[in-house]
Amino acid sequence: MKIGLIAMAGVRVRTKELAELGVTLPQFVNRGKVVASLPSLGLLTVAGLTPPDHEVVYREFGELPPEGELEHFDLVGISSFTAQIDEAYELAGRYRQAKVPVVLGGIHVTLNAQEAAGHADAIVLGGAEGAWPRLVADADAGRMQARYQGCTDGVFEAPQYARPRFDLLAGRDYNRVTVQTSRGCPRDCEFCAASLRITDRFQQKPVELVMQEVDAALDVMERPFVEFADDNSFVDKVWGKEFLRQIQKRNCRWFTETDISVADDPELLDLMADSGCRQLLIGLESPSAEGLAGIDRNDWKLRQSDRYLEAIDAIQSRGITVNGCFIVGLDTDTPDIFPAIRDFVRESRLLEVQVTVLTPFPGTPLYLRLAAAGRLRQQRFWDRCTLFDVNHRPANMSIGELEAGLRWLFANLYNEDELRRRRRDYMDIVKLRRAA
Ligand code: SF4
C-alpha cells in the first residue's frame, strides 16, 4: 500500500483585536511560528511503525491543494491538534469522498473519540505503538476495524517501540528537528493537554535509544538544532545527567521544556550548559502564590514559587535562557495579574516570556470542571483553542477585562525597548557569573 501521513499545522488566533496585534508584535508570534514549523514527530513515529513492505509519504497540510483532486494514497493517516481538528475533519472528508480510507489519531482524537469516529474510517486511541502495525495489517487484508487502542505503557520497549523515520525529512526546509525522550509528566496540571493524557504513567526512553534517534535526526539536518518534544524532560535527574553526557558528544544545540526543579542541581545545570542547551521553556504559570494553588495535583508548583527568582538566575547565569510561561485567566486572577506579570518579568530578568490564556482543551480535567460549572463560553470552540482566545468565563474578572489585559500585557512585554532591556539584563547576569 502507499500510505499518506498528513500533519496539520498553523494555529490562527480568532479574536480580531489580538490577531491584529500579533501582526505588529514580532516577538509575540515568534515561538508560535517555531512550533508551527516543527515536523510532526507523531507521524514520523507512525512511519517508523509501518511495516517496510509499504510505501510511506509524509506531507504537511499546507502542501496539499486547497481544493480539487488530492494526491492518491491507499490509506491516509492524519494527526492534528485541537485548534486544527475541523480542518483535519474536512480533509478526511475529501479523501473519504474519493474512496480513500482515513485514519485519525492524536491527543484530541483520543480525548474526543466519539466525535472523531464520525469523521474517519478508523481512529487510533492513545499512542500509535501497539495499534498502527495491527491497523496496517488489517487494512491490507481489507478488514480494518473502526477503533484501535494503542499501548499506554511500555511504549519505549520492544516490540512496541519503533524509531521515528527522520529520513522522511531529508531535503525539507525545517529549522529544527524534534526528538522525544519521555512521555507524560508527573505534575499532572489540571489544564495540561500534552502527552500525559495518552499515557498511564511517566515513561522514560533509555538514553541509548534517545541517542540513536538524535544521530538519525542530525543526519538529515545541515545546521543541527534539536527540540526535545517532551512534556517535562528532566523529571529523572540521574537519567538526565547520563543523557547530557551523551548529547554533549554530538556537538548540537538544543531546546527543551522542563520544570523549575532543574535549578536545584548545579551539576545538572553545568552539564546542560556544556552540552549545547540554548533555552529551557518552563511553565511558571503565575507570579502569585494564590494563582498557583490547585494548579497541579500536589500543589508542587505552589511549593516552588518562593524560589522562582533564585532558580531563574541559576539557570540563566550559565548561559541558558529561560522562556518563562505564564497563564492568565486562572480562577484567582483579577485585573491586577497583568501588571504583576510585567513586574515579575522585570524583576526575574527572564530573557523570554510567553503569556497564554487558560484554555479548557476538550477532555481535560479543566474542561470537565468548567463545563460542569457552566463556565464555558460556547458548547464547541475547538478552533479557538489557540491559547490566546478566551473560551471560558473567568472567576474574578470579566471576559472583556481578560482580553484587554492580555493586549496590554503583550504591548508592554513585546516591544523593542523591553526586548533590548531584557537582552542587556541577561548579558549582565552571564557576565557577572563569568567574572565570579
Ligand atoms: S508541568 Fe507542564 S507538562 Fe507537566 S503536567 Fe504541568 S503543564 Fe503539563
Image (tube, rainbow, N blue to C red):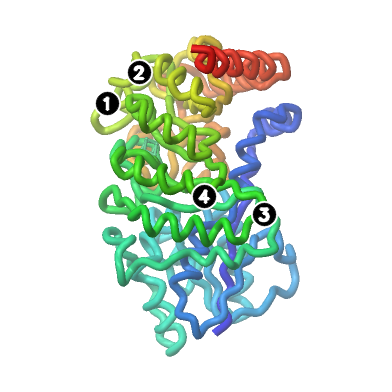
What amino acid is found at the position of numbered circle 4 in the picture?
A: Arg
Residue 361 is marked as none
- Lower position in the chain sequence, tag 4 or tag 3: 3
Q: Earlier in the sequence, mark 2 or mark 3?
A: 3
Q: Amino acid at mark 2?
A: Ser
Q: Is residue 311 left or right of residue 348?
A: left
Q: CA distance from mark 1 to mark 2?
A: 10 Å
Residue denoted by label 1: 299
* Crowd band around label 2 with a 10 angstrom C-alpha radius: few (<14), some (14–19), many (20+): some
Alpha carbon of mark 2 to alpha carbon of mark 3: how far? 40 Å
Task: Give the label, 4 or 2, closer to the camera.
Answer: 4
Which residue is drawn at the image coordinates 51% and 30% (left, top)?
357
From the viewer's side, name the closer residue of 178 and 122. Answer: 178
Question: Is 93 left, or right, of 363 in this rendering?
Answer: right
Which is more toward the observer, 212 or 185?
Answer: 212
Q: In terms of secondary structure, where does tag 3 sit?
A: loop
Q: In the rendered structure, find residue 222 and report the number of the disc placed on it.
A: 3
Beta carbon at label 3 within 8 Å of ligand 1: no
Horizontal side, residue 33 vs residue 52: left or right: right
**Circle 4 residues within 10 Å: few <14, some 14–19, many ≥20:** some
Residue 344 rendering spot, x and y as whole percentages: 50, 13
Q: Residue at x 24, y 30 (%)?
A: 298
Can you tell which quarter of the image residue 161 is in? bottom left
Report if residue 255 is visible in the image: yes
Q: Do the residues bearing badges 4 and 2 touch, measured as CB atoms within 8 Å? A: no
Residue flagged by tag 1: what amino acid is it? Asp
Cα distance between the residues tagged 4 and 1: 37 Å
Q: Which of the labelled discs sits on residue 250, or is there none? A: 4
Q: Look at the numbered discs 4 and 3 and tell me whether their residues touch, using CB distance below 8 Å.
A: no
- Location of mark 2 (residue): 305
